[in-house]
Image (spheres, rainbow, N blue to C red):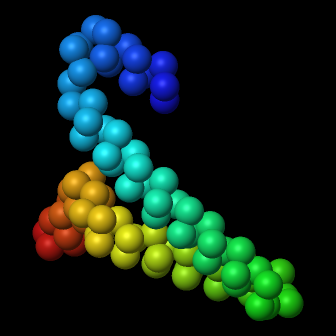
């Protein structure tokens, strides 16, 4: 990723570098929150199968909600594409 960022900067003159950095930071925040949810759920549930199911569902929900709250444009585009496909 750092190599691609460097190539983008040197060959294309930035090409929205500040937007890429902002989006990357938002994704890191959402990913950290998702990891925290998995960590907390892991301590509450004894069954391995339930740990996987519950932590996956809750962590995914937290991630998607945070992407929406942080207004990650790429996530909004994916959501719009999904809605358009379902609406057909």
Residue 6: image x %, image y %? 40, 17
Residue 82 seen in this snapshot = no
- Closer to the camera in the image, 86 or 65: 65
Q: Tell me if residue 42 can be seen.
A: yes
Q: Residue at x 32, y 18 (%)?
A: 8
Q: From the image, which quarter does the C terminus lie in?
A: bottom left
Circle count = 0
In this rendering, is residue 68 above or below 45?
Answer: above
Splitting the image into 4 quarters, where does residue 52 fall?
bottom right
Q: Is residue 56 left or right of residue 70?
A: right
Q: Quadrant of residue 42?
A: bottom right
Residue drawn where x is 43% and y is 54% of the image: 27
Residue shown at 45%/69% (left/top)? 63
Left of 53 or right of it: where is 71? left
Indicate the position of residue 69 as horizontal and vertical percent values: 29, 72
- Between 36 and 56, the residue placed more toward the observer is 36
Quarter of image, res 53? bottom right
Q: Is residue 50 above or below residue 38?
A: below
In the picture as drawn, the residue positioned furthest to the top comes out as 11
State the image coordinates of residue 30 (x, y, percent, origin top left): 46, 63
Q: Is residue 88 left or right of residue 38?
A: left
Q: Tell which of 80 and 39 is nearer to you.
A: 39
Does 24 sit left or right of 32 as displayed?
left
Which residue shows up at 74% across the image and 87% down it? 50
Q: Nearer the viewer, residue 29 or 83?
A: 29
């Amino acid at each position: 990723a750092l190599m691609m960022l460097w190539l983008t900067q040197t060959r294309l003159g930035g090409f929205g570098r500040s937007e890429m950095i902002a989006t990357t930071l938002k994704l890191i925040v959402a990913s950290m929150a998702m990891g925290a949810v998995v960590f907390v759920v892991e301590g509450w549930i004894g069954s391995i199968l339930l740990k996987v199911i519950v932590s996956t569902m809750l962590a995914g929900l937290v991630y998607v909600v945070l992407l929406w709250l942080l207004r990650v444009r790429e996530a909004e585009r994916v959501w719009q594409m999904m809605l358009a496909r379902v609406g057909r």
